[in-house]
Amino acid sequence: MSTTPLRYAVFGAGGIATVHLDMIATQPGVTLVGLCDPADPSTWRIQKQYADAPRFTDPATMLRETKPDLVSVCTPNKFHAELSLLALQHGAHVACEKPMAMNMAEAEAMETARAQAGKLGLINFSYRNVASFRFAREIVARGELGRLLRVNCVYLQSFLGAPAQPYAWRNDVSIAGFGALGDLGVHMLDGVRFITGLEYERVVGLAQILIPEKKDAAGKTHRVTTDTNAAWLSELSGGVIANFETSQVAPGYGNYFRIELSGEHGTLVVQSDTPDDLWLHAGASLTRYATWKTDLPKQAVPTEFFRNLKPTTPAGIVRAIRGEAEDFPTFADGVRAQRMLDAIGQSMQSQAWVTLG
């Protein structure tokens, strides 16, 4: 792979910024030229190895002075569109956190600006890196499950329901745009589409706020305005029915993301808690007969599959900039997920199915 030098900068100094730094700034030929966050630098969650990078509090100043080739947007959701557009205007490629934007209009504006600038745009749908998810995608693409018949997807966490967990920006709809629906649901929307290769055609859904208020770290009480759990039913291309449930208030669950698919010749399950394994019952002969004893044996992802497995996000954008063919989640993928988030919101308002164009 070419190691054409790349100048790299990051908007945002929270925990997710470290993920981008560790996967992008550490690559050969990449130079970290700037970090930007309006917060007091003493509160930045940046690891020591990146502490010497130039620090800024104003985005335009950083872009003007550092002239990066690539920028990561690792801020609260409210600022994704604004900062991505600014970076594109300054001639940089963009790796943006999910969800892509606060609404469909912002997402479309980001993709339009990216195309006009002739730059690459990545949305960090991180589960595309998981070995079992990628192997499941290959199984489906090879037709080993036959025609797909059904999808079930859940993503459950407990942290928001825990009184010891303080209020944060993710609980404010004016900054986050969504709660569980956008934070977790967007991974579900992309994950199902990534593995199955199917598109969403219509949806009906609802969401709730089950935790009305929380205290911040200083003890001040705030109203929670983001959804704590959501559920929706979708029809995918080919008439496949898919049902989804997500919650941030399910006691006992840490980060439990599970996708189950059934086809004519098998059932397949992947989940985040066991990223190197899947559950698989498949084969035309095996599924020719009904079974009255549930049989979904655990199957390790083959060792050889790991050999050439490279993280596609956010690291893949570096390889793509350097001309290597790369299958990373693009701005266009982000727009598709955003379209579904907006459609679910419309469905909640109308209490009816919404068809996607």
Image (tube, helix red, strand yellow):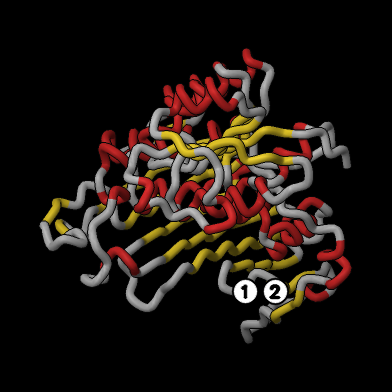
The answer to whether residue 146 shows anywhere in this view is no
Q: Nearer the viewer, residue 304 or 283?
A: 304
* Callout count: 2
- Position of residue 282 relative to residue 234, above or below, is below
> Which residue is found at the position 53% from the left and 58% from the top?
48
Left or right position of 198 against 135: left
Q: Residue furthest front?
A: 52
- Position of residue 142 relative to residue 132, above or below, is above
Q: Which residue type does callout 2 highlight?
A: Asp
How busy is the neighbourhood of tag 2: few (under 14 within 10 Å), some, or many (20 plus)?
Answer: many
> Which residue is found at the position 46% from the left and 28% from the top?
83
Q: Secondary structure at mark 1?
A: loop
Determine which of the numbered discs, if any, sits on residue 277 in the image: 2
Determine which of the numbered discs, if any, sits on residue 274 in the image: 1
Q: Which residue type does callout 1 highlight?
A: Thr
Q: Nearer the viewer, residue 23 or 226?
A: 23
Q: Are marks 1 and 2 in contact (CB under 8 Å)?
A: yes
